[in-house]
Amino acid sequence: MGQKMQLNQEMMDGQPVLHLKSDRLDAAVVLQFKDFFREIAEKGAQRLILDMKDVQFMDSSGLGAVVAAMKSLGPGRKLDLANLTQTVEKVFKLTRMDTVFKIYPTVDDAIKS
Amino acid sequence: MASLALVKEGGLPQCKPIVHVNIDSTQAAVSASLRQVCIQLYTLGLPAEALSSAEIVLAEVLNNIVEHAYQNQAGQNIALWIGQAKKRLNFKVVDQGQPLPDLELPAGKATDLDVQTCDLPEGGFGWFLIKSLAKDISYNRHPNENEIQFAIEV
């Protein structure tokens, strides 16, 4: 089964925004996500904004992949999140991972802060 | 018709079976089946909160079966039944994989986030999510078979 997900990078006001193009971030696509993220992270931006607008569902392995992505940046670099849908926000809140990440209501809010 | 009988035998009384699917033991199949099942549940007109809880719990239960009970071996079956009662959805999941360790449900404790960033957990959230969102979770080991039941309040 060809799972399709994409991580499209766009410069917005000089800041790299990663649009996660998949309606699910689950066990079936986490390896793809990790690969795409690694490629982008290697370019060395200080701060990345992950736009999760299209992600209608995330399971615990998806959450683990976002945590792993943030950790892979190392000290001094940041991964901020924007546009969490209801179910995705619920998983962040229940696991209290919402206290670990900076989460913005929109990409605009993330860029301006 | 066999599936309807099983729902009754499995102890889901007075409950209208609305979903019965067999899912192959891969993460891709679980993902695709969940998509379908959630569309079916959506048509019941349940509150979004209950739907998202159902999808989260189901995903964790099914992925655990793929990963641990079947140890990522494709070609095995996971059977899922969902029944609707008055104020809840009842779920039964059966597989023929390895039993749960110590034949009991994992504790599902919250992970410790009070650590350095580099030590943050990347897993271990699954059973915590299941226990946070589902009610009346039970596990039964039958000969060569695992049966997990739980409910989501609507």
Image (cartoon, helix red, strand yellow):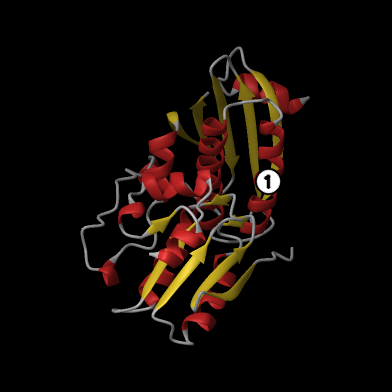
* Image position, residue B67 (x, y; %): 52, 57
Q: Is residue B131 left or right of residue A1?
A: left
User: Which quarter of the picture shows residue A54?
Assistant: bottom right
Q: Can residue B14 be seen in the rendering of this structure?
A: yes
Q: Residue sitting at 67 percent across and 32 percent down?
A: B42
Quadrant of the image containing the C terminus of chain A: bottom left
Q: Which residue is mark 1?
A: B35
User: Which quarter of the picture shows residue A81?
Assistant: bottom left
Asked which secondary structure carries label 1, the reply is helix
The tally of labels here is 1
* Image position, residue B114 (x, y; %): 21, 58
Q: Is residue A65 left or right of residue A75?
A: right
Quadrant of the image containing the N terminus of chain A: bottom right
In the depicted view, which residue is nearer to us: B6 or B31? B31
Q: Residue sitting at 45 percent across and 67 percent down?
A: A111
Q: Please, is residue A111 above or below residue B32 in the view?
A: below
Q: Can residue B142 be seen in the rendering of this structure?
A: no
* Residue furthest bottom as drawn: A43
User: Which amino acid type corresponds to the residue marked 1 in the rendered image?
Assistant: Arg
In the depicted view, which residue is nearer to us: B99 or B62? B62
* Image position, residue B74 (x, y; %): 66, 60
Q: Residue sitting at 52 percent across and 81 percent down?
A: A40
Q: Please, is residue A45 above or below residue B83 in the view?
A: below
Q: Residue sitting at 69 percent across and 66 percent down?
A: A4
Q: Please, is residue A53 above or below residue B143 in the view?
A: below
In the depicted view, which residue is nearer to us: B145 or A23? A23
Q: Is residue B110 left or right of residue A110?
A: left
- Subunit of label 1: B
Q: Please, is residue B151 above or below residue B107 in the view?
A: above
Q: Residues within 10 Å of mark 1 (few under 14, many from 20)?
A: some
* Image position, residue A83 (x, y; %): 51, 54
